[in-house]
Amino acid sequence: MSHLLAALVVLLSRLPLRVLHALSSFVAFLMGDVFGYRRKVVLGNLQNSFPEKDPRELRKIARAFYRHLADVQLEAMKLLTISDKELNRRCRMDEKGKALMQSYFDEGRSFIGLLGHFGNWEWVPPVTSLNLPFPVVPVYRPLKDKVFDRLMLRIRGRYAHELVPKNLVGRSVIRYQRSGKPFILGLIADQTPRPKTAYWTTFLSQDTPVYHGPEKLARSLDVPVFFVAMRRQQRGHYFMYVELIAEKPADLKEGELSRRFMELLEKEIRQSPADWLWSHRRWKYSLRKK
């Protein structure tokens, strides 16, 4: 069954994006209105994050979220066949951030890009690779299904210099440092860690645990850290926003880098609330269980 679904993904990737978006609208209808995919989780997360919004407005955001989620899934498939020209046409990169990143590369300095599950996060490594001349090294979580894991590696690896499993980040970073060549390490940093290993902050009106790993890595390497957000401009078109979080993370007090990242991510979510991944149980732990 997995092989058939993987073959279907490859075939779908050959369709024009306008056709995929039409299909996406139908998939969103099935997820949200027919099957109610994680609907209680989605609405619960929205209610707790935006207590000032009325139920009607929250349902509207939820409906838009399902369309966004379907779009991201199908647009990720398109990475198998999309041309460089079309990808650049559909996604512009922040020129100010791009120039700052280029200046670090010219100095032979590596840096870290932190992002959340916001906008089309799957397009961040490809767009970065097309706009900047250094190796882009995204960190990924391997899937349990080996067929789909290979497929996602193929999709995500088309533009990446190398994909690094999350359990091999330290070893890979050491290898790149020894090579003496600058690189950018891409990390998604808004997952849910276990309370005892987390840094706690207030995020979207709630006590929230944050993975401490990205901050510990940044502080140990003491390389510049950027916040990255792929903002949706219109369907299938994005603007990749980049902002420097810290030039020397080791100079910050513990937790400050994580706090700054979550603050910037919350700002993006409040500006476009349907574009974050609301279907995950982001707040399944409470501060009392710390």
Image (spheres, rainbow, N blue to C red):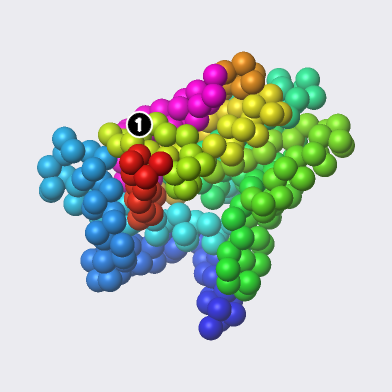
- Asked which quadrant contains residue 272, the reply is top left
Residue lying at 64% horizontally and 50% vertically, measured from the top left: 166
- Residue underneath mark 1: 202
Residue 210 appears at what percent x and percent y? 46, 38
Q: Amino acid at mark 1?
A: Thr
User: Does dot 1 land on a helix, a strand or a loop?
Assistant: strand
Residue 97 appears at what percent x and percent y? 58, 24
Judge whether residue 44 can be spotted in this image: yes
Is residue 263 or residue 2 the one in the foreground? 263
Residue 266 is covered by the magenta coloring: yes
Residue 206 appears at what percent x and percent y? 30, 37
Is residue 280 or residue 35 the one in the foreground? 280
Tell me which segment is drawn in magenta. 253-276
Q: Quadrant of the C terminus?
A: top left
- Does the magenta stretch mainly form a helix, a strand or a loop? helix
- Asked which quadrant contains residue 24, the reply is bottom left
Q: Relative to 191, does residue 132 appear above or below in the rendering?
A: above
Is residue 24 or residue 2 the one in the foreground? 2
Q: Relative to 70, does residue 254 appear above or below in the rendering?
A: above
Judge whether residue 29 can be spotted in this image: no
In the image, taking residue 209 as reference, residue 178 lies left or right, namely right
In the image, taking residue 226 as reference, residue 220 lies left or right, namely right
Residue lying at 41% horizontally and 28% vertically, measured from the top left: 263
Residue 87 is covered by the magenta coloring: no
Residue lying at 62% horizontally and 33% vertically, measured from the top left: 216
Is residue 72 or residue 192 the one in the foreground? 192
| Residue furthest out toward the top | 251
The residue carrying pointer 1 sits among few (fewer than 14), some (14 to 19) or many (20 or more) residues within 10 Å by Cα, namely some
Residue 81 appears at what percent x and percent y? 62, 60
